[in-house]
Image (spheres, helix red, strand yellow):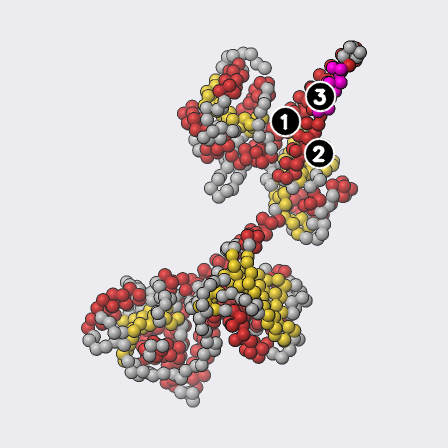
Amino acid sequence: MKTDKNWNGFNILAVEDSKVQSELLRDILEQNGYSVYLARNGIEGLEKTRELNPDIVVTDVNMPVMDGFKLCRKIKSDTALRNIPVVLLTQLTAPEDIIEGIVAGADNYIPKPYSAEYLISKLEQIITSHDWRAKNGGTNAPHEDGDNLITVSRQRITNYFASAYENILDKNRRLNESEHRLKAVNDELEQVVIKRTADLMAEISERERMAEVVQESEKRYRRLVEASIDYIYSVTIKDGRTIGTVHGPGCEGVTGFTSEEYYADPDLWYRMVHEEDRDAVISQAEKVLAGAPSLPLEHRIIHKDGSLRWVKNTPVPHYEGQVLVSYEGLIVDITERKNVEEKFYQAQKMEAIGRLAGGVAHDFNNCLTAIIGFSDLSMSEVGQENPLYNNLETVRSAALKASRITRQLLAFSRKQVSEPKIVNLNDLVSDLNKMLKRFLGEDIKLHTILAPDLGHVKSDPSQIEQVLMNLAVNARDAMPDGGEFLIKTGNIELDDCYVRDHPGIVPGEYIMIVVEDTGMGMKEEVKEHIFEPFFTTKGKDKGTGLGLATVYGIVKQNGGDIWCYSEEGKGTTFKIYLPRVYGKTEAHILNSVIKELPNGYETILVVEDEAPVRRSTVTILQKHGYTVLEACHGIEALEIMGEIKKPIHLILTDVVMPNMSGREFIERLNVLRNGFKVLYMSGYTNDIMSHYKILDEGMNFISKPFSSTDLLEKVRDVLDGQ
């Protein structure tokens, strides 16, 4: 230890809550030429760091008010202070504590208790390393905590594990010194064996006790290491080449292979790496051998049982002087995390596609409303004998098909306008039974297993019917030579385990619908894409690829989840979970009878900002006996209502318009006069309608695009009070 008290040019801030420890630390540092400042806790330490800007901060970990980890994070997150080296003094040397130090951004740590020689040599090493990095481009940013992402330089990780390794060596050194001293005592005792027999036996007993303590301590440390990481491998290097690899005992749990199998077959590790990731793993090893920085690598391996696993491989090189002599690697099984991430990314992708689909709905629906309306008008005027009639009918059919596609896209995006009711799914399945039998055909047997105590759900019954019909379509196409189709219902409770693997679902009571077929099944790569819009394995003109996308959207819109299991040649099973509700069921009429096209005599005000939609709507109503007034927005409509004194029986208004919404227009009109009925129309999606409270109970609404038949029937229903 140095005895020169001359100042060596370095200022050290020591943060220690123990007065005895802080004074001892100051004496050691000042005796070796350091200028020392003291702080009693983390808050005072942070203030003095900002005030003094010391060359290095040495801090205890366990302190009141603010511990050393938090102080370190504060320093490293301050752009003005982050380049000041921070060293932790701690008795905590377990792997999780070392990792917490790394996360906090500390440059190194010194375990307690420490000798003066070890403390000074360690500080000199840290200062020298820090100066070298400063001269060679500075240090990496310690960490970035905003998104729970951590970036730690390879040098700091090496320093930390080197400190842990040095700590073990120091303990072993002290143990060896104790053993040497005991041996010397034994040598002396042998000269006076008769006189000191009793003392000698006591010394031997104490030595055995110490050996047991050390052995138990090593076992505890080994258990901690094996619990913190899945397993460790060690690679020995000579002349820049690998000469041997040892895999730790935990390797069998991760890979299925034992340490002995790896020893017997040195190339086993590379062969078990997934072929698409093999080049990356080899490149990582080459970087380590070349002395280049190597970040942790996440890659796939093939388990001994044939299953696919994800692991995180973190190499830590070990040098003697400037020569790389070995490196250790940490192998962590991250398969579960990867599976959850994949489900989350898939949910994000589906959400993005849904937003895109919902975004185009309004303008597209307005266009389709005008096309369908004018097609209906033109067909009624030219007559079926006119050559143009078939052309117009083709245009109308194409527009109606586009309308159905739009509705399917909106169902997928969870923005379809719906009318939820409290229903019992058993009743819906029973009502659909006959239709499904006719639809599936004689070669496919339909079975239903309905739970007698089934709870209720709150959903739009027509949407649930659409879900079952779409699944039946897929099942029928998967069984061209016949088979069996099963619908089963039941009550179920989804726990935290299920929720963890299915983002967006909350634990609780659900109603389950199981739909099974004995068809040809699906490959895994096909199953991964089945809910994506326009994805289909059917031939040309045999499907739009929107059937299962619609099912997915409806289930998600109703707060539920859908799960699929399928194997080639073994059929397909879909399980749908919808939240259970309590309350009285509401009546639902399946396949209501189509009414005859109605006429009228009443006066109607049409308020619509899209001119083509307004003109087609006005013309259709006029051709069927109604007196029609028109306005392009709410302000013009208020002016008309102020001038017209005769009764207005119905106001047919768009919801989203410039200047004021349809809902606001009606509220202002109610102040001026009453005695009229209101029918809202819109091509916007369900969430927009909910924003304007159009779907509240008692509101009349017709969704664009609509045909002349849809419009006339809805107008008649509202006027007649149905």
The residue at 28%/67% (across/down) is: 666
Disc 3 marks a residue whose amino acid type is Glu
Is the residue 134 above or below the residue 349 in the image?
Answer: above
Query: Magenta region: which residues?
Result: 198-209
**Between 416 and 133, the one nearer to me in the picture:** 416
Q: Is residue 373 magenta?
A: no
Residue marked by disc 3: 206
Q: Is residue 199 magenta?
A: yes
Task: Give the Cα distance between marks 2 and 3.
Answer: 41 Å
Disc 1, disc 2: CB below 8 Å?
no
Q: Where does the image place residue 224, in percent across and percent down from the top left?
A: 63, 36
Query: What SS does tag 2 mark?
Result: strand
The residue at 66%/21% (across/down) is: 174
Residue marked by disc 2: 237
Residue marked by disc 1: 166
Disc 2, disc 3: CB below 8 Å?
no
Is the residue 105 above or below the residue 626 in the image?
Answer: above
Task: Give the Cα distance between marks 1 and 2.
Answer: 20 Å
Query: What SS does tag 1 mark?
Result: helix
Query: What SS does tag 3 mark?
Result: helix
**Between 314 and 173, the one nearer to me in the picture:** 173
